[in-house]
Image (spheres, grey):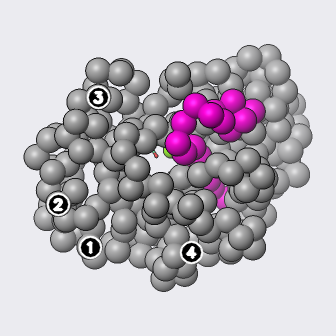
Amino acid sequence: MNFLKLLKKPNLIAAHRGDRSQKPENTLSALASSIGKCDFIEIDVQLTKDLVPVIIHDDTLGRTSDVSKIGRFEDRTPWRVSDFTLEELQSLDFGSWFNHEYEPILTLKKALSFAKEQHLFLNVEIKDMSSTFADEIVVQIIIDMIKKMQAGHLVLLSSFYHHYLPMCKKLSSEIPTAALQIYKHPSKLIDYLHTLQVNAYHPEDKITNKKTVASLREAGFFVNVFTVNKAKRQKKLFDWGVNGIFTDFLA
Ligand code: G3P
Ligand code: MG
């Protein structure tokens, strides 16, 4: 099966940053913990200073690592991910902030090899790197890695920075893509999504309504909504025809 076929199944549950209510978000243990509890796993990817795709949500390291306790990094505030090499990130602990257990940084390469081994589907969210040196190359590097790992069939690429999405399609017409959106739908939404050449739309729950879902589904776009933690709301969205929801709490 590939990701597009998966999207045709009803009522999909996506593990937001892995099983993040049980394990430190975006780590291998968060991926492992979500096995058997969801249909696909969402992870956030950005590049290190030496251009390695790593799995971390925030632009900075403070919240999800022990960087603030490491003397040699004292003068590197605000500890931007893109200012650190992979080797430096590998010296940090990405688990103890959450449950006092060490976790290394997860690379995209490792996440993809784990997904292949365990037959997992991954929604790889490409973080907005437009304010960094990596803006021009981030998409190419991520897609090269997915191709190298022969994992294209297991991946859905998404981004809030919509400029990346046609680039994804250009580099790999096979891998499905999704536009993420917060606050407000773009005007002429359906036309806009056609110009981005995406397969899916990922709006935040707050801006999602029955009419918009119906028109998106009618136009052939898959709709996956984030972040929906309440069962009652999940059911309502599925009743409206939403394909999937992202949640922090897996049953
Ligand atoms: O991809 C869905 C969701 O992860 C988008 O928001 O900020 O949690 O990456 P964020
Ligand atoms: Mg995300």
Crowd band around label 3 with a 10 angstrom C-alpha radius: few (<14), some (14–19), many (20+) = some
Q: CA distance from mark 4 to mark 2?
A: 34 Å
Does the rendering let one see residue 240? yes
Residue 97: image location, x then y, percent? 72, 21
Q: CA distance from mark 3 to mark 4?
A: 40 Å
Q: Is residue 188 magenta?
A: no
Q: Quadrant of residue 148?
A: bottom right
**For the point 76% across and 27% down, which residue is it?**
95
Q: Which residue is mark 2?
A: 218
Residue type of the residue flagged with mark 3: Lys
Find numbered disc 3 in the image and state the secondary structure of the residue it sits on: helix
**For the point 35% across and 74% down, which residue is it?**
197
Instruction: Check contact, mark 4 vs mark 1: CB within 8 A.
Output: no
Part of the protein shown in magenta: 29-48
Task: Give the mark nearer the N terminus: 4 vs 2.
Answer: 4
- In the picture, the disc for residue 235 is 3
Residue 61: image location, x then y, percent? 68, 38
Instruction: Check contact, mark 2 vs mark 3: CB within 8 A.
Output: no
Instruction: Check contact, mark 3 vs mark 4: CB within 8 A.
Output: no
